[in-house]
Image (cartoon, helix red, strand yellow):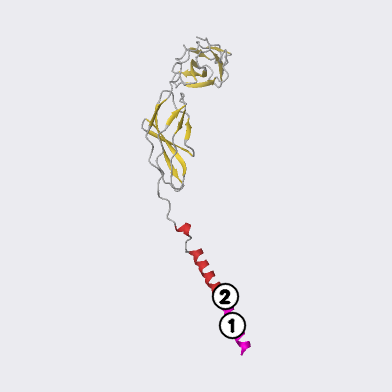
Amino acid sequence: MVANTLAERAAARVGARVAVLVVLVVLGGLGAIGVPAPALAAEADTEAPAAPGEIIALGITRTSVTLVWPASTDNVGVTGYEVHRQYSDTIMIYKTETASMTVTELRPSNTYRFAVLAVDAAGNRSKKSPWTTVIMEPGDSTPPSVPGTPYATEITSTSLVINWGRSLDDNGLAAYLVYREQAGGMPVIAILPQSLPQACPSLRFTNLTPGATYTFRVAARDAAGNDSATSDPVTVTLPGGSESPIS
């Protein structure tokens, strides 16, 4: 009887442990498949950040400006900013993770407006800051001097070299534009870059038509995009079996 009682008690203890283990496994499984943890049960972040402070423009040049503003605050945390640039009827949006940025590739003398809003990790967007108006510094508006009258050398039935007196500019030349015209056709423009300025600029033309007559003019362009007036023309008739005059 005593032995049987001890055996029954041991079996009861084992059964109880197995029951507890089964309950724990079941509860764990329920948690894995549907019972949310306290952190997961929390509501999603729907609170937008506070609007950033007004933008301050620093370091205004002809083509760039540095913008800074008081940082925004958020109940969870701000992850970035959208900077809105308005010019005329066009809005351009830039993104940055910090409370400052430099905007480039602007145009001299133009007036731009800038505003900024904050974004948090949940994608909530704040209201915009007040608009800040920025007037860019004046740019170079003076065109280069008119190039000298071109003249032709090394003339063959299908090619020639056009030469001209160099142009001058207060901020440096960017390129020459050589206009080639043929009766009944549209002008063709050849661009000769001046990253390394030429003291005696020239340009070779090939694949021309024997016996055809061409007229050439030259203009200069500076780094600000200002074009000079075109030079006086030179007209060349290529030889087509016999020498033709150059006028």
Q: Position of residue 38 (x, y in %)?
A: 47, 59
Secondary structure that dominates the magenta span: helix
List the single residue furthest toward the right. 3
Q: Is residue 195 magenta?
A: no
- Which three-letter amino acid code belongs to the residue tagged 2? Arg
Q: Nearer the viewer, residue 187 or 110?
A: 110
Mark 1 vs 2, N-terminal side: 1
Q: Which residues are magenta?
A: 1-18
Counting from the top left corner in percent of width and height, residue 56 is at: 43, 30
Q: Is residue 132 left or right of residue 245?
A: left
Quarter of the image where one finds residue 3: bottom right
Find the residue positioned furthest to the front. 2
Q: Which mark is residue 17?
A: 2
Characterize the local packing of mark 2: few (<14), some (14-19) or many (20 or more) Cα atoms within 10 angstroms: few
In the depicted view, which residue is nearer to us: 243 or 168? 168
Amino acid bearing label 1: Arg
Q: Which residue is mark 1?
A: 9
Q: Above or below — where is 215 with respect to 37?
A: above
Q: Quadrant of the N terminus?
A: bottom right
Q: Nearer the viewer, residue 135 or 120?
A: 120
| Residue appearing at x 55%, y 77% in the figure | 16
Residue visible at 57% across and 81% down in the picture = 12
Residue at 49 percent across and 67 percent down: it is: 30
The percent coordinates of residue 21 (x first, y second) are 56, 72
Residue 10 belongs to the span the image colors magenta: yes
Asked if residue 3 lies left or right of residue 52, the reply is right
